[in-house]
Image: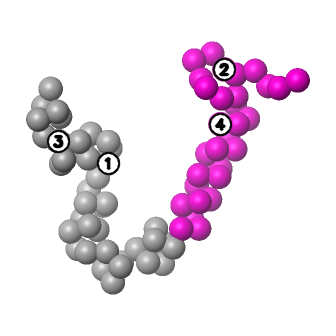
C-alpha cells in the first residue's frame, strides 16, 4: 500500500524528501553551477543577474515590470 499524501500536497512526505535530496544533488553535479560558474563561461551581466536574483518576483520585475507593479 502506498504512503498517503499529506493534505494539501501533491506528493507524500517520503517522495518530497527524495525530491529535495535529488534536486540538491543535481545542482552539485551540474558543472555550470560549480566549476564553470565564472566569467569565462558567463558574461559579467549574466553573473550579476544570477547573484542578485533572490526570487521569481525579481525575474518578473526585470522582464515584465508592468506585471510586477500590479
The secondary element bearing badge 4 is classed as: helix
Span highlighted in magenta in the image? 1-30
- Could you tell which of marks 4 and 3 lies nearer the N-terminus? 4
The x and y percentages for residue 58 are 24, 45
- Could you tell which of marks 3 and 2 lies nearer the N-terminus? 2
Check disc 2 and report the residue beneath it: 6
Marks 4 and 3 sit apart, C-alpha to C-alpha, by 32 Å
Marks 1 and 4 sit apart, C-alpha to C-alpha, by 23 Å
Mark 2 neighbour density, 10 Å: few (under 14) some (14–19) many (20 or more): few
Give the residue furthest to the top: 7
Task: For marks 4 and 3, give the one nearer the viewer.
Answer: 3
Q: Quadrant of the N terminus?
A: top right
Check disc 3 and report the residue beneath it: 64
Q: To which quarter of the image does residue 66 belong? A: top left
* Residue at 70 percent of width and 22 percent of height: 5
Check disc 1 and report the residue beneath it: 54
- Could you tell which of marks 1 and 4 lies nearer the N-terminus? 4
Task: For marks 3 and 1, give the one nearer the viewer.
Answer: 3
Q: To which quarter of the image does residue 37 belong? A: bottom left
- Could you tell which of marks 1 and 2 lies nearer the N-terminus? 2
Q: Is residue 4 magenta?
A: yes
The secondary element bearing badge 2 is classed as: loop
Marks 1 and 2 sit apart, C-alpha to C-alpha, by 28 Å
Check disc 4 and report the residue beneath it: 16
Marks 3 and 1 sit apart, C-alpha to C-alpha, by 16 Å
Marks 4 and 2 sit apart, C-alpha to C-alpha, by 10 Å
Mark 3 neighbour density, 10 Å: few (under 14) some (14–19) many (20 or more): few
Label 3 with label 1: CB-CB less than 8 Å: no
Q: Is residue 28 left or right of residue 60?
A: right
The x and y percentages for residue 63 are 19, 47
Q: Is residue 35 magenta?
A: no
The secondary element bearing badge 3 is classed as: loop
Amino acid at each position: 500500500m502506498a504512503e498517503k499524501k499529506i493534505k494539501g500536497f501533491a506528493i507524500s512526505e517520503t517522495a518530497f524528501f527524495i525530491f529535495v535530496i535529488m534536486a540538491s544533488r543535481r545542482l552539485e553535479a551540474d558543472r555550470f553551477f560549480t566549476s564553470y560558474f565564472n566569467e569565462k563561461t558567463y558574461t559579467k551581466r549574466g553573473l550579476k543577474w544570477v547573484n542578485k536574483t533572490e526570487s521569481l518576483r525579481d525575474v518578473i520585475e526585470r522582464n515584465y515590470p508592468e506585471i510586477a507593479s500590479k
